[in-house]
Amino acid sequence: MPRYFFNTRIGDDVIPDVEGEELRDADHAWRVAKAMILDLLEDQAEHPNLLTASLVVTDQSGEVVLEFPFSEALIAQPENPATRH
């Protein structure tokens, strides 16, 4: 399985993910990124500047797979909506 790295960018500062995580594909990485962001926002609610941060997800070669703004995680649609119309 490919390894993805979840690097946090806040302004000009980057907190690198040196371990990464083996995941099935980029879609799985997107779901993991969203969950990570929501957890961080919940745990660090007293730091509103986190809403300006983003997770920059890269693959093993350092290629950017996706960039996920923290603020977008709050509005991203759920995968399985509670009601079906």
Image (cartoon, rainbow, N blue to C red):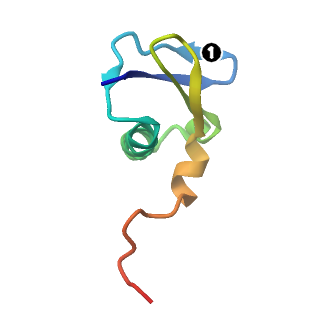
**Which residue is located at x 32 percent, y 31 percent?**
23
User: Which residue is nearer to you in this view: 12 or 45?
Assistant: 12
Q: Based on the displayed image, in which of its 4 quarters is residue 40 positioned?
A: top left
Q: Position of residue 5 (x, y in %)?
A: 43, 20
Q: Is residue 60 depicted above or below 22 in this figure?
A: above
Q: Position of residue 35 (x, y in %)?
A: 38, 45
Q: Based on the displayed image, in which of its 4 quarters is residue 78 positioned?
A: bottom left
The quadrant the C terminus occupies is bottom left
**Which residue is located at x 38 percent, y 83 percent?**
83
Amino acid tagged 1: Asp
Q: Residue furthest bottom?
A: 85
Q: Position of residue 72 (x, y in %)?
A: 59, 50
Does dot 1 land on a helix, a strand or a loop?
Answer: strand
**Which residue is located at x 61 percent, y 36 percent?**
49
Q: Residues within 10 Å of mark 1 (few under 14, many from 20)?
A: few
**Which residue is located at x 56 percent, y 29 percent?**
65
Q: Is residue 48 depicted above or below 19 in this figure?
A: below
The quadrant the N terminus occupies is top left
User: Which residue is nearer to you in this view: 70 or 77?
Assistant: 77
Q: Which residue is mark 1?
A: 13
Q: Is residue 12 left or right of residue 54?
A: right
